[in-house]
Amino acid sequence: NFIFAIGSMIGLGAATRYAILRAQGEERAAQRYFSNAVFCACLLAVPFVLVGIFCPGTLLRLMGGDAGIVALGIPYARIFLLFTPFFMCNYIVSAFVRNDGAPSLAMVATLSGSLFNVVFDYIFMFPMGLGLAGAALATAVSPMLSIAICSRHFFQKDNTVQFVRQLPSAKLLGQSCQLGISGFVGEMSSGVTTTVFNFLLLGLAGNVAVAAYGVVANFALVATAIFNGVAQGAQPLVSRCYGRAGARKLLILGSCTALALAAALYAVVFGMTDTLVGWFNSENSVQMARFAHNGMRLYFVGYFFAGFNIVAAGYLSATNRPLEASVTSICRGMVAIVTCSLVLSAVFGMPGVWAAFPASELLTALLTLFLLLRKKKQTA
């Protein structure tokens, strides 16, 4: 999760800087960001690679693994960590290709890498008998495939991204990370939410409640990916409109799109709750089904606000407002969700845990609206 978050932060931030500078006509300055992003990602990957080579078991023990888990996890952790540079660079290459007028190619690359991971997870683990090491290998190869597909763009006539010979620059990296913080928090927030919810639910109702949250979380990952797609698709367009009225129109269009998607998503969840839960309830546990049923219907109300928050955070980054983008992202991804889950679970029990997500997203939406309207008044 942390590796992906670093890659997302560097890739999204550097590509946004690139698009903004090109929109301002500063072509030479823009070209420095791609090379610097790749160099810095490779340097930041070195500690992870060294841990993978020399002490993957120590890392697993630090994360709470007992002897049995460590024995099982060492092959997986070692392979995964060794391929850290490819995971990070995949975010960078994809973001720059998307910002250089080839979003369809970036989408095909992402889908191909994901499909490869799913299919070869099974092939490596079972027909080839590689077990967890096979799962790690499938996961490790998938970003390499995605990078290879995206790389086609660099040989096209309409490519404007150039690799510049230069030493890694901490200044350029810092400027990139400023605009990429929403990507970092977005990747990390799922891990934070899962950890907090699991501990709370385990204390309230035991493993059955944790299993119910597993059902909710699986569908939540898909839902969040949809809204991240809207935000990432809008970002290159917003950056090209930097400093012009068209950027705000894109924010309104993106927000309306997110609201329409949230309504469609909730209609499906509300109308098919028991069917969706049943897909993950092979033991036909009545208690788990009841927990998950209530959880799905309460939790997914939050996407009416989460969609706007994700799109707005992307807009703020794309228009070179890193402080506001950081505040919005950290509020929804860390502060608000942790605070709401602790308070509401203490007051309402398990329903409070499920309600924490919509409550935190509503609070973040109000904060985000304040930041957007304040800027509008200052501009006026």
Image (cartoon, rainbow, N blue to C red):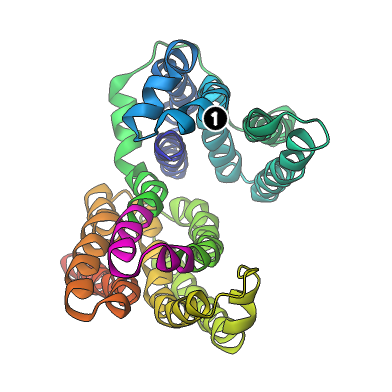
Where does label 1 land, which residue? 72
Mark 1 burial class by Cα count in 10 Å: few <14, some 14-19, many 20+: some
For this orientation, the residue located farthest to the bottom is 271
Q: Nearer the viewer, residue 42 or 131?
A: 131
Q: How many marks?
A: 1
User: Which residue occupies 29% across, 69% down?
Assistant: 204
Residue 210: within the magenta? yes
Question: Residue 357, position in %: x, y?
Answer: 33, 70
Q: Nearer the viewer, residue 325 or 350?
A: 350
Residue 245 appears in the picture as rendered: no
User: Element type at marker 1?
Assistant: helix
Q: Nearer the viewer, residue 194 or 188?
A: 194
Residue 74: within the magenta? no
Question: Residue 287, position in %: x, y?
Answer: 48, 78
Residue type at mark 1 is: Leu
Q: Is residue 289 left or right of residue 112?
A: left
Q: Quadrant of the C terminus?
A: bottom left
Q: Quadrant of the N terminus?
A: top left
Q: Magenta segment range? A: 194-212
Question: Residue 202, position in %: x, y?
Answer: 33, 61
User: Which residue occupies 30% across, 34% down?
Assistant: 175
Q: Looking at the picture, does residue 17 appear above or below residue 40?
A: below
Q: Looking at the picture, does residue 262 appear above or below residue 228?
A: below
Name the main secondary structure of what is drawn in magenta: helix
Q: Is residue 292 left or right of residue 93?
A: left
Q: Is residue 123 left or right of residue 187?
A: right
Residue 20 appears in the picture as rendered: yes
User: Which residue occupies 63% across, 33% down?
Assistant: 132
